[in-house]
Image (spheres, grey):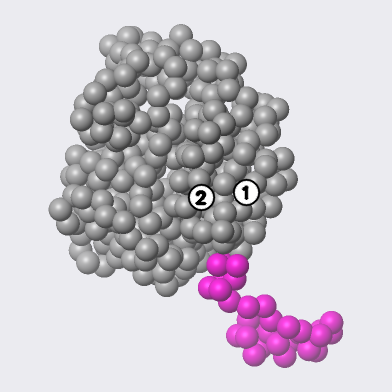
């Protein structure tokens, strides 16, 4: 059974039934948030019950998901991604206590598997066999991967400029792909129209309320992996804002059921070339469309579809929003990889770039415990990595030539 008691509009507060499929508020058009019977959940989901649970995936927190049964649960290892104490990276960034959570270890190599897991399971529960979604690549490859594991073939809309590696993932999992001759935002809008026209289930991030319910699982894991002692700051990249709103909701849910006794601050990191959320947090709180053109394609968004909820997350948590240059994002890829052994795509490394700027500007407290989210694997965009990683050393196949090349390169 589900302990979800309904959905509530994040704008006007209108309430909706948890039955059926409602995407956004029919009164003001704002996004919805799932509400639970937290008292009932608290009686079932305890530190003791979790200590005896051998399911190390997102599903170990079943009572805090809006699902009635397990019919749509995928036979894949989703979630419970590793969290590493990153002492060398902390020294390089100028902070004291830092952990890196590597969500590039999920089945499709991105954080988006958390969202797709719950959203797709909900679609199956509701009886849909046609699932669609728009994405710059990661949400699409995630949807394709997870759907393939339960015998479904989704319909995907991507901008024509999406990275080739992500397109390859989507296609190999058997999805039908429309490459839209335009931006992510145009692909998003076309997907909305198509879903309405054909009656498809729409998985779009920042439109479907159940994507946030999957993303909040990251917060559950962080707290349990840190022995129920929440961090002071959680640093993450922001594009459409759904990770921000989801991670914040996860911590609030845990607080509501008594599993943690305090809440961390959210830190939103955006590229200067896609900064609508940061602009709103730093400014008057109103999301205004920008013209996104960042190298970090996963967070390149003109109009953040969950922007209002993201701004609320940062402000409610007394958090921070920061922008960084694309050059700093690319520099963060080897900065993260070389001391930590974690390979991130540009968006996945953006949090490191943002943390570096905040530390440099003295906006991080000396003893604060920080978790930085890495949201996507570097193999998603190898061209970006090659731009910053340095080149190979050509050498003929002979020891004399090798010695000369090694000496010239300062290796020997």
Look at the numbered disc 2 and give the secondary structure of its residue.
helix
Q: Between residue 8 and residue 349, name the one nearer to us.
A: 8
Q: Residues within 10 Å of mark 1 (few under 14, many from 20)?
A: some
Q: Residues within 10 Å of mark 2 (few under 14, many from 20)?
A: many
Q: Is residue 310 visible?
A: yes
Q: Is residue 402 magenta?
A: yes
Q: In which image quadrant can residue 396 be found?
A: bottom right
**Which stretch is magenta?**
383-412
Q: Position of residue 335 (x, y in %)?
A: 46, 65
Q: Is residue 158 above or below residue 385?
A: above
Check contact, mark 2 vs mark 1: CB within 8 A: yes
Q: In which image quadrant can residue 409 be found?
A: bottom right
Give residue 187's mark. Answer: 2
Please report the residue visible at 25 percent of the width from the left and 46 percent of the height from the top. Answer: 311
Q: Which residue is mark 1?
A: 178
Give residue 12's mark. Answer: none
């Amino acid at each position: 059974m589900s302990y979800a008691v309904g959905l509530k509009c994040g704008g006007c507060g209108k309430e909706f039934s948890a039955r059926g499929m409602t995407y956004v508020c029919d009164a003001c058009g704002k996004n919805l948030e799932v509400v639970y019977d937290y008292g009932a959940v608290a009686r079932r989901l305890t530190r003791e019950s979790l200590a005896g649970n051998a399911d190390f995936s997102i599903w170990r927190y079943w009572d805090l998901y809006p699902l009635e049964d397990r019919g749509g649960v995928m036979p894949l290892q989703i979630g419970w991604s590793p969290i590493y104490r990153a002492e060398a990276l902390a020294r390089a960034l100028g902070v004291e206590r830092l952990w890196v959570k590597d969500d590039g270890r999920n089945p499709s190599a991105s954080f988006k598997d958390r969202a797709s897991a719950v959203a797709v399971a909900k679609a199956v529960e509701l009886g849909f066999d046609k699932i669609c979604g728009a994405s710059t690549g990661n949400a699409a490859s995630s949807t394709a991967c997870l759907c393939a594991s339960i015998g479904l073939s989704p319909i995907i809309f991507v901008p024509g400029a999406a990275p080739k590696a992500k397109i390859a993932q989507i296609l190999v999992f058997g999805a039908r792909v429309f490459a839209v001759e335009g931006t992510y935002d145009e692909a998003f809008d076309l997907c909305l129209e198509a879903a309405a026209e054909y009656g498809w289930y729409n998985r779009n991030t920042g439109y479907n309320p159940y994507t946030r319910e999957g993303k909040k699982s990251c917060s559950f894991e962080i707290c349990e992996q840190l022995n129920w002692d929440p961090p002071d700051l959680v640093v993450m990249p922001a594009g459409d804002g759904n990770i921000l709103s989801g991670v914040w909701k996860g911590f609030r849910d845990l607080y509501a059921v008594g599993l943690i006794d305090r809440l961390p601050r959210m830190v939103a990191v955006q590229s200067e070339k896609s900064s609508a959320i940061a602009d709103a947090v730093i400014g008057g709180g109103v999301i205004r469309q920008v013209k996104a053109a960042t190298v970090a394609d996963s967070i390149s968004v003109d109009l953040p579809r969950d922007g209002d909820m993201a701004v609320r997350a940062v402000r409610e948590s007394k958090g921070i929003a920061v922008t960084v240059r694309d050059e700093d994002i690319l520099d963060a890829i080897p900065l993260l990889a070389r001391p930590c052994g974690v390979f991130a795509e540009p968006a996945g490394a953006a949090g490191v770039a943002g943390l570096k700027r905040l530390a440099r500007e003295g906006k991080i407290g000396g003893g604060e415990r920080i978790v930085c989210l890495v949201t996507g694997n570097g193999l998603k965009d190898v061209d970006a990595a090659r731009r910053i990683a340095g080149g190979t050393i050509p050498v003929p196949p002979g020891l004399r030539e090798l010695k000369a090349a090694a000496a010239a390169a300062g290796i020997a």
